[in-house]
Amino acid sequence: MPGYRTHLAGGVVLAAGGLAFLFWVGLYRPGWEKAAVLLAIAALAALFPDVDTDSRGQHLFYSGLFILDVGLIATERYVWAALLGLFAMLPAIGRHRGWTHTWWASLAVPLPLLLLPPYLFGADWQGFAPHYLAAVGGYVSHLLMDGTVKS
C-alpha cells in the first residue's frame, strides 16, 4: 500500500490537474490563495482514510487540523472549531480499511463543507462547491491508489 507521501502527492496532483483543467477551459479561475486552500483540502482529504492508524499520515493530518482549530478559535469562529473537533473524531468509529475506504464515504465525509455553511450561516452553497470537490478528489485519489474501494 502507498505511504502518506504518495497519498499526499496523489491528492495534490489530482486537485492541481482538476484546477488547471477548469482554469484552462475558463469554468473556474480562483486566485492563488483560494487555489492553495483547495490544494490543502485535497491533501488532507487524501490522508483521511488512513488516519485511524498510528502513522506519519495521521500525525500530519491531525497537526493540520490542530493548526486550523487554533486559527478558528483565535478568530472567534467557535462553531466551526467545535464542528471541526466533532468531525475529526469520525475515523475512530470503525476499523482500519472499514467504512473510511468506501466509495460512499468519499462523498459523505466532505459533505459538511458543502452543507454546513448554508445551514449555519445562510451562505451560498455554490461558493463551497469547490471545497467539497477538492475534498472528494483527494479522498478518491487515496482509495484509487490503495485499490481498496468498497461498497
Image (cartoon, rainbow, N blue to C red):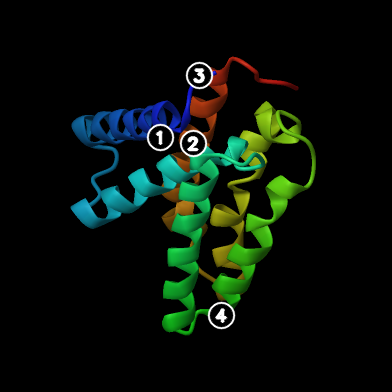
Kindly identify which residue carries mark 3.
145
How far apart marks 2 and 3 lie (CA) works out to: 10 Å
Kindly identify which residue carries mark 2.
46
> Quick one: label 3 or label 1, which is nearer the N terminus?
1
> SS of the residue at dot 1?
helix
Name the foreground residue: 2 vs 54: 54
Residue lying farthest to the right in this orientation? 94
**Above or below — where is 73 with respect to 60?**
below
Kindly identify which residue carries mark 4.
78
Q: Say few, some or many: other residues with alpha carbon within 10 Å of mark 3 (under 14 / 14 to 19 / 20 or more).
A: some
> Quick one: label 1 or label 4, which is nearer the N terminus?
1
> SS of the residue at dot 4?
helix
Specify the amino acid type for callout 2: Ala
Residue, x 46% and y 33% (percent of image)? Answer: 4
Residue 109 image position (x, y, % from top left): 64, 45
Residue lying farthest to the top in this orientation? 147
Residue, x 49% and y 41% (percent of image)? Answer: 56
Check if mark 1's residue and mark 4's residue have beta carbons within 8 Å.
Answer: no
- Foreground label between 1 and 4: 1
Residue, x 69% and y 46% (percent of image)? Answer: 91
Specify the amino acid type for callout 1: Leu
Q: Is residue 125 left or right of residue 16?
A: right
